Amino acid sequence: GAGFLVNASGYIFTNFHVIKNADNEMAIHIEFSNGSFCVPERILYKDSINDIAIIKIPTALTKGRAILPLHSLEGIVGEDIISFGHPLGFKFNMTKGVISNMYIENEPQRFLFDAPTNPGNSGGPLLNKFGLVVGMVEGRYDSKSAGIDVQNLNTGIKVSYLKKALEKFNIKYDSKALLEDKELIERQKMLMSQDSLRKTQASQDLAVKESRRKQDSIQSHLEKQKREIDSARVAQEAIVKMLEQERNERKKFQDSLREANKPKPWVAKLSFNYGYDLGALQDLEDNQGLKNGGPFWDIDVMFGYRTNIVKNDDKGTIAALFVSAGMMDKKAASVHYWAQNLVDKIKDNPDKYFSPDKSSLFLEGEAGFVIGEGLRLSAGMGAISIRDKFFNYYTVTGGFNFPLGPVNLDILFSSMMGQDFPFPTLRFKAGLGYRIYFE
């Protein structure tokens, strides 16, 4: 876990759940960023409901260390924050995000933020851009706690509850920001410079009126004042230029963030699949002793448009076209030929039709949707060449795409029915595909 100093006397905040298993203060080990270690003098406060704990270290150990000020108000939704901690053992790590929600039903002490959070961040401070503590990291929602896959949904303890804990023991804390608004300071400097120029000019006018008889001295004085004015003007121009440069750099950074989050609506995927054709659902075994089914493989190409996306990493619904081409094993091809076209003749002359012939090519085209970029539902038409004759049919496909980065694992079921296929068939296939997104 993590913690942070809020008082020069050595008071440290952390989560209750970080130290709850410690039998005493000697079981708690504190490491500072310079590599030094200590144990606390005592555990001052434990609050299991609000998940707050305060521990005390010797005052001498706080010398030269950062004392974090507490915000006088609560955080604001959308406000930039920085989280410090030790996720997965990476010591003194920093992540950035925003406050996403200040209200959790029935939990008034907590709020939500999206800075990446992992085991080891618990108890760390959440700072705004002025270095003020707006809360303390508590935990996160994950698939185990929420029951579904979630991302960057983390909880923090509000700063007002931290201050209440300190006030119970009359512990003082600071609320002055660590960082100041640089643009405001520069504007104040410029106004002070302008005011100084006005005062200098007024003093010069008074000197001219009182020293008319000393024209040479006055002239020299005016030239000196002119040089000062020119110098001040140059300084003012430099300040304006510096502010303009900062604005341009900030705009470039914002533009780069927008470009990185720009959604890529088009998607394409190339897959290789291997499967098993279970044959016609019409049962031929009772009359002919025929064993249905056989293996096949195909190459599947998808091209589609992603809907309902705002950011590139959103999971929208894909409206897509699918084209498949492949080869069916000779046994499965013969089964289809027997089952779909020669049912009556098989009974009379089975030896003539029961010898496997050869593998058959097939081509299919479908249109449909990939819901949530994971559940595929599509339908279309296809054709297969069996014994040098083409047979047409309708197709319906459904199944799941499991993303593994850019690689997808596909598990699909499909049916061949209609037109030249009076008996519906069922096929199962699985394969790997590579997916890319583009504008």
Image (cartoon, rainbow, N blue to C red):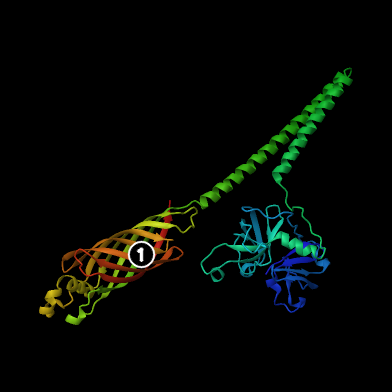
**Residue 314 against residue 209 in the figure, above or below:** below
- Horizontal and vertical percent position of residue 310: 49, 52
Which residue occupies the foreground of this view, 263 or 374?
Answer: 374
- Residue bearing the label numbered 1: 271
Horizontal side, residue 286 vs residue 295: left or right = left
Q: Residues within 10 Å of mark 1 (few under 14, many from 20)?
A: many
Count all numbered tags in the image, as a single digit: 1
Which residue appears at 77% of the width and 53% of the height?
Answer: 176
Horizontal side, residue 159 vs residue 426: left or right = right
**Callout 1 secondary element:** strand
Horizontal side, residue 66 vs residue 299: left or right = right
- Horizontal and vertical percent position of residue 93: 65, 63
Find residue 248 and report its image quarter.
top right
Quarter the N terminus occupies: bottom right
Which residue appears at 34% of the width and 59% of the height?
Answer: 368
Which residue occupies the foreground of this view, 256 or 368?
Answer: 368
Find residue 115 and report its image quarter.
bottom right
